[in-house]
Image: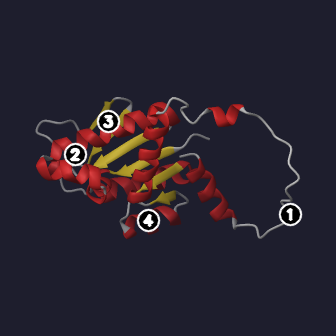
Amino acid sequence: MSLHIIIDGYNLIRQSQQFSELDLKDLQLGRDALIVALAAYKRIKLHNITVVFDGANAPGLSPPREQLKGIRIVFSRHGETADTVIKRMAAVEKERALVVTSDRDIVRFAETHGAAVIGSSDFENKLMMASVANGSADGGGNRDLEGWKPTTKKKGPRRRLSKKARRQKNKLGKL
């Protein structure tokens, strides 16, 4: 099952120190920086990524949907908020969706429809860690190639998470 990451664009930009500084200078600079960071992340993780922005702040003559560097960009229509678009997408995608937002209303809605949710600042940390790992000489990928190593460490039984919590943890582990 492939993971579809749905991002509340302006929420992520304004929660981030890196992107918010650019956003204060020019709205388009903030959006472009986010798209560049997400494109680098997509090259590493290969997840479907959709960023949703409010259409009121859309660049002039911009189509409501476009694709740039493998990232799907959606602007809400006139009279519609990005929150509504995100909720609709989360309701359709259900368990395949991972919603990135710090908006409590969207978080509650997405969770009730089976989508996993991660806060904007937490996702930004994942973005930055992925870019650092990609930029290093090792790439961080050789750990998986080392193979199994025998150990005597006991792993014994422990309290099992609920099914919902295990699904959430599994999705977040894919980031």
Residue drawn at (20%, 52%), measured in percent from left and top?
A: 21
- 4 or 2: tag closer to the N-terminus: 2
**Residue type at numbered disc 2:** Gly
Q: Which of marks 1 and 4 is in front?
A: 1
Residue drawn at (86%, 48%), measured in percent from left and top?
A: 151
Quickly name the residue at label 4. Answer: 107
Which dot marks residue 146? none
Which dot marks residue 30? 2
Q: Distance between the residues labelled 4 and 2?
A: 23 Å
- 3 or 1: tag closer to the N-terminus: 3
- 2 or 1: tag closer to the N-terminus: 2
| Residue 31 is at least partly visible in this image | yes
Q: Which of marks 3 and 4 is in front?
A: 3
Residue drawn at (27%, 40%), measured in percent from left and top?
A: 33
Quickly name the residue at label 1. Answer: 156
- 1 or 4: tag closer to the N-terminus: 4
- 2 or 3: tag closer to the N-terminus: 2
Quickly name the residue at label 3. Answer: 36
SS class, disc 2:
helix
Above/below status of 107 relative to 25: below
Q: Decide: marks 3, 4 in contact (CB < 8 A)? A: no
Q: In which quarter of the image is residue 164?
A: bottom right
Q: How many labels does the image show?
A: 4
Q: Position of residue 107 (x, y in %)?
A: 43, 65
SS class, disc 1:
loop
